[in-house]
Image: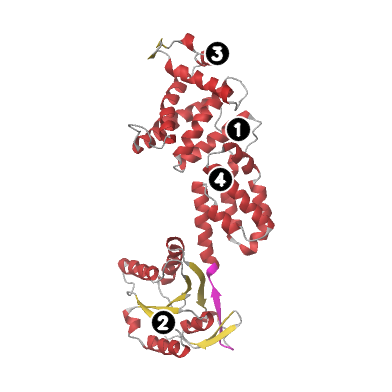
C-alpha cells in the first residue's frame, strides 16, 4: 500500500494526532500517517521550495528512524494552470494499475486538496486504484489543553464522487451496474433496491419496454424501503434517489391500458434519443408506430406476429401506392382492409413520410453496417433527429399520445 502525502514550508506545531484509537505525537502529519498505516512506501509531494526546506529534512529523518520507505515526488509551485496540470500528472503517474492508496491532504496548500480529490476520482476509473483512505490531520480542531488533534477521514466524500458518477451514468445511459454495486451493502432492502435497479437498467438497455413498465411501477417503493437501511452505509443515496425516480418512474405503466402504454413508450423513445441511444430509439419507434396505428384503428393491440404483420402490411401498402413493382403499379385496391381505412385518414401522408424515413434507418442500424452501400453514421443521426423524430412527435401529438408525468 502507498501513502501519498504533501509537505509545505509552514511552521507546523507539535501535537498528538489521534485516529482509530492510535496516537502519534509529531508536528509533521506524514509521520503520523506512516505510524497509523504502515505503508509499503510513502510518497512526499514537494515543490522546489519545499525540497530545500528544513521541514523535508526533518520528515526524512523521522521516516528513516521509523523504517518507513519514502520517495520524493517533485511537483511545481502551482503558480499557473500549466503547473496545476503538471501536479495532477505527477499524482496520477505516481500510482500503478490496481494499487491500494491512502491520500494525506493535511499539509497540502492552495488548490492541492482539490487536485488530490480529482486525482482520486481519476485513478479509481482510469487505473482501477483502490483508494483506502483520504485523511486530514485537523490541528485546528485540537483539544487545546491536552493538545490532541483528531484525524478526519474524508473517504466518504470520495465515495460521494462514486455515487454521483454512477448515478449520472445510470440516468444518462440506463446502465446501473456501478450504482447497483454501491447499493448492495448487505442488507435485505438494499439488496432488493440493487436488484430492482439492475432489472430497470437491463430492460432499458436491451429495449424491453414492457418489462421496464412493470419494473418502473414499483421502483419508488423499492428504493424508499431501502432508504433507512442505507442512511448509515450510503448517505448520498437519499439525495440521489429523487433524481433516479424522476428519470425512471416515468416509464412505469399499466400494460392493460393501451393509451397509457403508448404514451409511456413514446416517452421512452424520446429519452433514448436524448441520450444518444439511437438503436433502441429507432427499434422501439418502429414497433410503436405499428401499435399506435392499431390503436388509432380502434383495434386491440395484439402482439401476435400475424396480427402485427397485417398492420405492417397496411402501412407498407400506403407507402407503395402508385409505385411500380414486378406485378405492376400498386393501387389503393391492392391495400388490405386496414390499409384502406388508413388511406382515408387526414394524417395518411404524414404516416407515409414517417414510415418512409423510419424503416431504412431502423434496418441500417439493426444490420450493423453489414449491407452494401450501408448508410453512413452522419446520415443515420441526421435522419433520425431531423426526419423521423419531428414526424413521430407530430403524429403522437395529433393522436393524443404525448403526455407529461410528474
Report the disc number at residue 337: 3
Q: Which badge, 2 or 1, comes first in the chain's sequence?
A: 2
Task: Determine whether, in the image, residue 5 is placed left or right of residue 48.
Answer: right
Q: CA distance from mark 4 to mark 1?
A: 19 Å
**Position of residue 102 measured from the top left corner of the image (x, y, whole percent):** 49, 73
Depth check, front residue: 128 or 176? 128
Do the CB atoms of the residues marked 4 and 3 lie less than 8 Å apart? no
> Callout 1: helix, strand or loop?
helix
* Residue identified by numbered label 4: 202
From the viewer's perspective, is the residue at label 2 or at label 1 nearer? 2
Kindly identify which residue carries mark 2: 70
Q: Nearer the viewer, residue 404 or 204?
A: 204
- Contact between labelled residues 1 and 3, with CB atoms less than 8 Å apart: no
- Relative to 59, does residue 188 appear above or below in the rendering? above
Mark 3 or 1, closer to the camera: 3
At 54% from the left and 14% from the top, the residue drawn is: 341
Residue wearing tag 1:
261
Residues at marks 2 and 1, CA–CA distance in whole angstroms: 63 Å
Range of magenta residues: 145-155
Question: Looking at the rendering, which quadrant does residue 218 occupy?
Answer: top right
Q: Residue furthest top?
A: 333
Find numbered disc 4 in the image and state the secondary structure of the residue it sits on: helix
Amino acid at each position: 500500500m502507498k501513502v501519498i502525502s504533501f509537505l509545505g514550508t509552514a511552521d507546523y506545531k507539535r501535537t498528538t494526532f489521534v485516529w482509530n484509537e492510535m496516537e502519534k505525537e509529531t508536528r509533521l502529519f506524514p509521520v503520523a500517517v506512516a505510524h497509523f498505516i504502515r505503508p509499503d512506501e510513502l510518497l512526499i509531494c514537494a515543490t522546489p521550495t519545499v525540497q530545500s526546506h528544513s521541514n523535508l529534512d526533518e520528515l526524512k529523518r523521522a521516516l528513516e528512524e521509523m523504517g518507513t520507505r519514502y520517495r520524493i515526488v517533485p511537483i511545481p509551485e502551482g503558480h499557473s494552470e500549466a503547473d496545476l496540470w503538471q501536479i495532477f500528472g505527477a499524482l496520477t503517474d505516481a500510482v500503478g494499475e490496481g494499487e491500494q492508496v491512502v491520500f494525506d491532504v493535511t499539509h497540502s496548500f492552495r488548490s492541492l486538496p482539490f487536485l488530490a480529490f480529482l486525482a482520486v476520482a481519476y485513478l479509481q476509473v482510469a487505473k482501477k486504484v483502490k483508494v483506502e483512505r483520504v485523511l486530514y490531520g485537523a490541528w485546528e480542531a485540537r483539544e487545546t489543553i491536552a493538545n490532541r488533534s483528531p484525524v478526519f477521514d474524508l473517504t466518504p466524500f470520495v465515495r460521494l464522487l462514486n455515487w454521483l458518477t454512477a448515478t449520472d451514468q445510470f440516468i444518462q445511459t440506463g446502465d446501473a451496474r456501478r450504482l447497483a454495486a454501491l447499493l448492495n451493502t448487505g442488507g435485505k432492502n438494499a439488496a432488493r433496491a440493487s436488484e430492482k435497479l439492475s432489472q430497470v437498467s437491463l430492460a432499458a438497455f436491451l429495449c424491453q419496454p414492457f418489462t421496464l413498465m412493470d419494473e418502473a411501477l414499483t421502483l419508488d417503493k423499492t428504493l424508499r424501503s431501502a432508504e433507512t437501511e442505507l442512511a448509515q452505509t450510503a448517505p448520498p443515496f437519499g439525495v440521489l434517489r429523487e433524481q433516479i425516480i424522476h428519470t425512471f418512474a416515468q416509464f412505469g405503466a399499466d400494460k392493460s391500458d393501451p393509451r397509457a402504454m403508448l404514451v409511456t413508450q413514446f416517452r421512452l423513445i424520446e429519452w433514448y434519443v436524448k441520450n444518444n441511444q439511437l438503436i433502441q430509439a429507432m427499434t422501439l419507434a418502429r414497433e410503436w408506430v405499428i401499435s399506435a396505428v392499431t390503436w388509432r384503428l380502434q383495434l386491440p393491440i395484439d402482439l401476435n406476429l400475424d396480427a402485427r404483420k397485417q398492420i405492417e402490411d397496411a402501412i407498407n401498402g400506403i407507402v407503395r401506392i402508385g409505385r411500380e413493382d414486378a406485378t405492376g403499379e400498386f393501387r389503393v385496391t391492392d391495400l388490405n382492409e386496414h390499409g384502406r381505412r388508413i388511406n382515408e385518414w387526414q394524417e395518411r401522408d404524414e404516416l407515409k413520410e414517417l414510415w418512409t424515413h423510419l424503416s431504412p434507418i431502423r434496418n441500417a442500424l439493426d444490420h450493423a453496417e453489414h449491407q452494401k452501400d450501408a448508410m453512413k453514421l452522419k446520415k443515420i443521426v441526421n435522419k433520425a433527429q431531423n426526419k423521423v423524430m419531428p414526424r413521430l412527435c407530430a403524429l403522437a401529438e395529433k393522436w393524443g399520445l404525448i403526455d407529461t408525468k410528474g
